[in-house]
């Protein structure tokens, strides 16, 4: 004879077992994701240390580095110039709208130059290059990996890591400060164009007001910061592309991840570097 309430007790026990199983499965999933994340961090750290150590050891593959600087720097020039011009014009217009309320219209050139050279220019240049170059490097190396071209280089006794990875990382480190400088001056010119339209300010007067208050401490630290941005773009995109798997899908995934991860790391590193620069030059 069935006891009263026995079925209800059994159902509660089954529900409790299912809840415990779901909770245990969620815990395993979180643990697995954390383990994979720290494993990725470790592999990326080893990859970066290997790339930096090989970059100072001969042979230096100067011809390939030159080709990559041309591909990364020269071909990115038009994009950087146009973007810098637009950013400078927007800064001038927005600054003018704010400073006119306080009677500080004469400080607009100074505000544009300080804003561009100290933070906006390096950050915009880093994000632009991570979008254009990071996607290109990730897709290129991923395509070579899935089509076994990297394995073919190894079969020909060519150090594929040094030839493909180190050269691109060094080229990014060299090219990004140059592109940042181009963007900064293009932005100053764009700021003058925007200011001349509204107040007919001459170019010599604008440049004098923009650069006269600035010292070397306003130029050097932001440019040094872009070396770090170039290192991030080169390492992240090369790491993801060099270790890609999964055929054509892996190529697209490497291209997307290269842009996303490098952009996030550039933004986070910019916050840290700005605070470090303020502390050092305070």
Image (cartoon, rainbow, N blue to C red):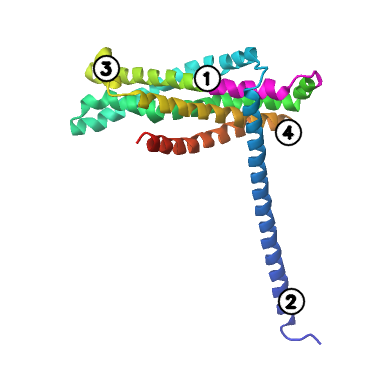
User: Could you say where residue 242 lies in the image, as x and y percent from the top left?
Assistant: 69, 29
At mark 1, the secondary structure is: helix
Crowding near pointer 2: few (<14 within 10 Å), some, many (20+)?
few
Q: Residue at x 69, y 74 (%)?
A: 12
Residue 92, quarter of the rendered image? top left
At mark 4, the secondary structure is: loop
Q: In the rendered structure, which segment of residues is drawn in magenta? A: 155-175
Tell me which numbered mark, 2 or 1, is placed earlier along the sequence. Answer: 2
Residue labelled with disc 1: 175
Q: Residue at x 81, y 87 (%)?
A: 1
Residue labelled with disc 4: 245
Residue 257, quarter of the rendered image? top right
Q: Is residue 240 left or right of residue 2?
A: left
Nearest-to-viewer mark from 3 and 2: 3
The CA distance from mark 4 to mark 3 is: 54 Å
Residue labelled with disc 3: 208
Q: Main secondary structure of the magenta part?
A: helix
Tell me which numbered mark, 2 or 4, is placed earlier along the sequence. Answer: 2
Of 43 and 102, nearer the camera is: 43
Q: Residue at x 38, y 28 (%)?
A: 118
Tell me which numbered mark, 1 or 4, is placed earlier along the sequence. Answer: 1
């Amino acid at each position: 004879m069935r006891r009263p309430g026995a079925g209800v007790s059994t159902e509660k026990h089954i529900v409790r077992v299912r809840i415990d199983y779901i909770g245990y499965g969620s815990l395993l999933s979180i643990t697995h994701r954390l383990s994979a994340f720290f494993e990725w961090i470790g592999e990326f750290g080893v990859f970066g240390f290997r790339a930096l150590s090989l970059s100072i050891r001969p042979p230096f593959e100067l011809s390939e580095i030159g080709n990559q600087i041309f591909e990364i720097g020269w071909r990115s020039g038009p994009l950087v110039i146009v973007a810098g011009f637009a950013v400078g014009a927007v800064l001038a217009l927005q600054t003018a709208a704010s400073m006119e309320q306080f009677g500080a219209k004469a400080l607009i050139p100074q505000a544009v130059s300080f804003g561009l050279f100290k933070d906006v220019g390096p950050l915009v240049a880093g994000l632009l290059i991570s979008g254009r170059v990071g996607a290109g490097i990730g897709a290129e190396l991923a395509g070579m990996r899935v089509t076994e071209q990297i394995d073919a280089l190894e079969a020909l006794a060519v150090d594929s890591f040094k030839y493909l990875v180190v050269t691109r990382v060094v080229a990014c480190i060299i090219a990004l400060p140059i592109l940042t400088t181009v963007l900064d001056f293009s932005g100053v010119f764009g700021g003058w164009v925007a200011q001349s339209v509204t107040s007919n300010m001459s170019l010599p007067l604008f440049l004098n007001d923009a650069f006269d208050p600035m010292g070397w401490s306003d130029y050097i630290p932001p440019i040094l910061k872009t070396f770090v941005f170039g290192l991030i773009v080169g390492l992240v995109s090369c790491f993801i592309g060099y270790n890609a798997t999964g055929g054509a899908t892996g190529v697209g995934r490497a291209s997307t991840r290269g842009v996303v991860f490098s952009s996030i790391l550039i933004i986070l590193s910019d916050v840290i570097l700005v605070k470090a620069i303020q502390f050092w030059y305070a």
